Image: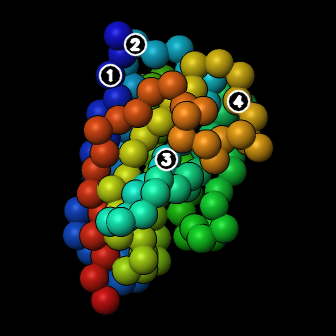
Amino acid sequence: QGQLVESGGGSVQAGGSLRLACAASAFETYCMGWFRQAPGKGREKIATINLKGMTDYADSVKGRFTVSQDNAKNTLYLQMDDLKPEDTAMYFCVIRATYCAVSLSLRTNYWHYWGQGTQVTVSS
């Protein structure tokens, strides 16, 4: 069984930046992504990337967040710039081990594996 380990969360002031990382061991991945969950809300898809490097973003983070992957290290990244208080949430790394369809990637049950999450807090 593989393991997903997120890191890089923390507290930052509005306008600041953070970089999340997700180390994926022993997985065959077709696509990876990031979800987040704010207190009292459901899990929201933030960004995805497939084996070809094609990306997709939620409208709320377009132009501010960048998803990337290092295939040699089997690591997924999320660069978050111009952070806003509404970005405060627990951020989760996800993996799908078969073909990925962007149209279905909003569904939490579409993803096969989830990390434990890393907290991001943005103060105004």
User: Could you tell me residue 103's position as x and y percent?
Assistant: 77, 43
Structural distance between the alpha carbons of marks 2 and 4:
19 Å
* Res. 3 mark: 1
* Res. 34 mark: 3
| Crowd band around label 3 with a 10 angstrom C-alpha radius: few (<14), some (14–19), many (20+) | many
Q: CB atoms at circles 3 and 4 under 8 Å apart? A: no
Amino acid under label 3? Trp
Structural distance between the alpha carbons of marks 3 and 4:
14 Å
State which tag comes first along the sequence, 3 or 4: 3
Q: Residue tagged by mark 2?
A: 26
Q: Residue tagged by mark 4?
A: 100
Amino acid under label 4? Cys
User: Could you tell me residue 10's position as x and y percent?
Assistant: 23, 62
* Vertical relation: 14 (above or below) 62: below
State which tag comes first along the sequence, 2 or 4: 2
Q: CB atoms at circles 2 and 4 under 8 Å apart? A: no
* Vertical relation: 77 (above or below) 111: below
Task: Report if residue 19 is visible in the image.
Answer: no
Question: Residue at position x 56%, y 52% from top?
Answer: 45
Amino acid under label 1? Gln
State which tag comes first along the sequence, 3 or 1: 1
Q: Coloring scheme of the render?
A: rainbow
Q: CB atoms at circles 2 and 1 under 8 Å apart? A: yes
State which tag comes first along the sequence, 2 or 3: 2
Question: Considering the numbered disc 3 on the image, is that residue within a helix, a strand or a loop?
Answer: strand
Question: Considering the numbered disc 1 on the image, is that residue within a helix, a strand or a loop?
Answer: strand
- So how many labels did they put on this image? 4
State which tag comes first along the sequence, 4 or 1: 1
For this orientation, the residue located farthest to the left is 11
